[in-house]
Amino acid sequence: MAEWALSEERLKYPLFQVKKGSGEFQNLSWDSAFFIFKSALDEVIKKYGSDKVVVFEFAGTRGIINRFFPYRFFNKLNATFLRHNVCDTGGDEALKDVYGTSVGLSPEDVKDSELIVYWGMNPVKTNLHGYNYFRRRNFEIWVVDIRKTETAAPNYFVQIKPGADIFLALLIAKILIERKWFDEKFVLQNSVGFQEFKKYLSTLSFDYLAQRCGVGLSLAEDFARRFFEKRGIIHIGYGFQRSYEGPLSVAFISYLPFLVGNLPGFIYNMDVGLNKDYVKGLNLRTKDQKFIHQSQLAEAIENDEVKFLFIYNANPLTTNPNVNRLRKAIVDKGVFVVTHDLFLTDTAMFSDLVFPAKSFFEYFDISDSYYHRYVGINEKIFEGWGMSNYELMIEIARYYGFNDPSLFESEENIANNVLKTAGISLDELSKFGYVRVDRPFKVETPSGKVEFVSKRRKLRGVPDFPELERLIIPEPEDKGALRLISVTYGNTISSQYHNTLRMDEKRIFISPGDAEKIGIKEGDEVVVYNERGKIFTTVHIDSSIPVGCAIMFKAFWKSIAGFTVNELTNDDVVKQFGYQAAYHSTYVKVVKRW
């Protein structure tokens, strides 16, 4: 981390790019940068309206003040914001259908269980603290994934076909119920629609479900038996639900721990009740709030819905799907792009104006977690370069001559107002560094019970018990195409740290069977392409990869690696599940490069 925070590549001055994408930047004074920012912003508002000003951000370091305080300035302008749909939106919707909430277990909440399933995730690389926590407690660990990951290798492993999660979930549920390996009294007392679910399962054969998910019945039965005996819980990954069939799969996976007596029995999301809306300053608006879905940014630009784009805590020209379309739309439509970042990321390289940002070592903040119930304090360690998100918006508001007190509220005062809804004071947090918030789980469905038959689902036109053949993704017209899954690279958080890590695994991983069909050998140079773009790389043949699938690591910077896999990913969405981005339903062709 020191190499990253103290890197010589960090930006120290505001930059103006003479021609977007040229890489020809001019150093600016802060006053000059603010003048350019205000001139461009005022011109867009005057010519097109304030709703054509779009703020693009994401979670960053989970710092609540530095993520949400910039909303205040842009809410005063009546700007447009994002609906974040590239991460966990689909599963979030699916869990709310069943439980009324997507907030499940914190690791320390787990009682009377001795087995955890990591379903569609590789915690050795993405959740090491949690993984080690359960290892220390001698939990039996099972992994459900499409490939043998670092987590799967030393533990019990169930390999499934890509996109087949719902079939395995139904297979395990059918085994649990028909073998009487479930807590029937508990289930009947705490749910609605169980008999309908049981009847639905009776229409599905063991052989059909096993064939569809690619898991042998013997292994499935062993998995189900041990899951029942040890009252298993499931940590549901985010990756597999970023697909056409993924969101609904989350709902059926979440039924499994409930069947064996756990409520909740899933780990997915966490919320300890901090008042984040306070930071956003929604009261500053004089017009209704407008949103654009994150993965649909290119389409919004093409439709002239975006003329000024302010980006912070994000690198969309690396991480957004179908990035070639996004890049072209920005140029064709003449969008003025401002980025606030520590480095010249792919997005900064395509910006008109760049403000240098501080690292989280250089500012105060408070943060919560996706995973546990602790709130932490982020204290400044050293004085670096640039400005934090909070500081930048203070200075811009001052440059504008605004005098609304909320645009200049102190960080300490904001923190206290955010914390008090969770029963915490800033003094307490400062004293201990972190504080646990106890917030009991509560089913929040209309019935007050777990819903196998969901009223909320019906309102969106989603069947409680789907026709499974309609969930199967049609094979591409080109029978040689492979389904591309882009996974997280170790020691990175999406595109963060790639520039200082400088360790690239740029190869495409395919099965021996597919390599033989294509006519390529280990280490061959290949072209990976589809209608959205093409990239040049080398091939690694891996016997753990299922036939018909290809694996590549996501979010490498094009300016460093020569490509980003998101030049190939689709920007489709699953509208019925919060417009969840479906980029893991991408197909590519792989051919030998001559």
Image: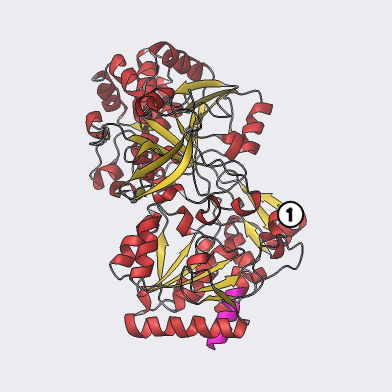
Q: Tell me, yes or no, if residue 307 can be seen here.
A: yes
First to last magenta residue range: 392-402
Q: Quadrant of residue 401?
A: bottom right
Identity of the residue furthest to the front in this view = 594
Q: Is residue 76 above or below residue 463?
A: below
Pick the residue in front: 447 or 1: 1
Pick the residue in front: 9 or 23: 23
Pick the residue in front: 532 or 122: 532
Secondary structure of the residue carrying numbered label 1: helix
Callout 1: 10 Å neighbours few (<14), some, many (20+)? few
**Does residue 139 appear to the left or right of 453 in the view shown?**
right
Q: Position of residue 505 (x, y in %)?
A: 56, 40
Q: Is residue 110 above or below residue 350?
A: above
- Count how many numbered circles sit on residues in the image: 1
Report if residue 571 lies within the magenta region.
no
How is the model colour-coded? Answer: secondary structure
Pick the residue in front: 506 or 40: 506
Q: Quadrant of residue 530?
A: top left
Q: Position of residue 72 (x, y in %)?
A: 50, 73
Q: Is residue 169 above or below residue 507?
A: above
Q: Position of residue 117 (x, y in %)?
A: 51, 27
**Does residue 127 appear to the left or right of 166 in the view shown?**
right
Q: Tell me, yes or no, if residue 450 can be seen here.
A: no
Q: Quadrant of the C terminus?
A: top left
Mark 1 sits on what residue? 2
Q: Position of residue 45 (x, y in %)?
A: 38, 82
Amino acid type of disc 1?
A: Ala
Give the overall secondary structure of the magenta segment.
helix
